[in-house]
Amino acid sequence: GNSVTQMEGPVTLSEEAFLTINCTYTATGYPSLFWYVQYPGEGLQLLLKATKADDKGSNKGFEATYRKETTSFHLEKGSVQVSDSAVYFCALVHGSGNTGKLIFGQGTTLQVKP
Amino acid sequence: DAGVTQSPTHLIKTRGQQVTLRCSPKSGHDTVSWYQQALGQGPQFIFQYYEEEERQRGNFPDRFSGHQFPNYSSELNVNALLLGDSALYLCASSGRQGGTQETQYFGPGTRLLVL
C-alpha cells in the first residue's frame, strides 16, 4: 500500500546551518506530495506542496522537489533559524476528486540552537 | 477569512464515556477529514465527509462515527472511550478546484485525554 518514510529525528542544528530532511514514498500512480509543519502545542500548517514529477514546492525559504525516479521529496532550507524548530511531516495524497486521504510519515523533529 | 476551527481545545474523559468533537471548515470548503495523532506519531486518517456522507474510512473501529451538516461543519463522535483513544484529533477541510482534490488545511486540534 501507500506509505511515507522520513528520516529519524531529532535533527539538531545551529542557527544558519543548512537543513535537509529526507522523505521517500511508496505509491502507485502519481500522488501529490506535501510537507506540513507542527509547532509545539499546535495543529498542522501546510508548508509546501508539489503535484507532479519535477515540480518544486517552496515557501518561507524551504524547498522540496518531487523526484519520481527516486520516489523522494526531501525538504531543504539554506539557513535555518531558531523559529524553525518544530516537527516536520511529509505526506502524500492519493485519490481522485474529493476522496483523497493524507498518508503521513512519522515526523522529524528539528531543533535549532542559537 | 477564518480558517478551520475546532472545539473544544482540550477535553478530559474517563474510560467508557462518549465524546463529541466539532469542526468548522475553512470558508468555501465542502469536505472535512478527521485524523488522530497519537503522541510522537504522524496523524492517522479516520474518515472523510462530503455532501453529508462518509466518503472514505481509515482503519478505525465503529466506535468512531461522524456527521456532516448542511453548512459543511462536522462532528466526530467516539463511544466507549479507551485509554488508547487519548490523542490530538485534527480536522482538515478541503474543496474541489478544477475537478481535482485541493490541499487539506488543518485546524488547531482537540486534545483528548482519557483517564
Image (spheres, rainbow, N blue to C red):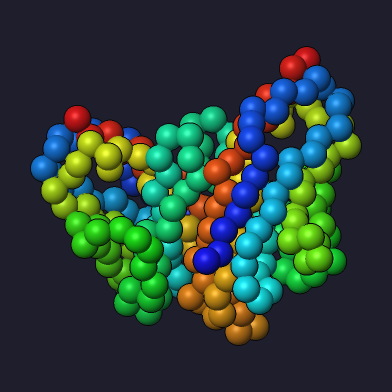
User: B6 or A103, which is in the foreground?
Assistant: A103
* Residue A101 in the image, given as x and y percentages of width and height: 50, 66
Total numbered circles: 0
- Residue at 67% across, 40% down: A7
Where residue A11 appears, x then y in whole percent?
Answer: 70, 28
Q: What residue is shown at x 32% (from left), y 42% (from top)?
A: B8
In the image, taking residue A39 as reference, residue A111 lies left or right, namely right
Q: Which residue is rendered at x = 43% and y = 58% of the image?
A: B45
Q: Position of residue B55 (x, y in %)?
A: 38, 76
Viewed as shown, does residue A25 lie left or right of B66?
Answer: right
Q: Quadrant of the N terminus of chain B?
A: bottom right
Residue B25 visible to the viewer = no
Looking at the figure, which quarter contains the C terminus of chain B? top left
Asked if residue A34 shows in the view, the reply is yes
Q: Say above or below: A84 vs B101.
A: above
Would you identify the image quadrant in which residue B61 lies? bottom left
Among all residues in the image, which is located at the extreme top?
Answer: A114
- Residue B34 image position (x, y, % from top left): 40, 58
Residue closest to the eye, A28 or A87: A28
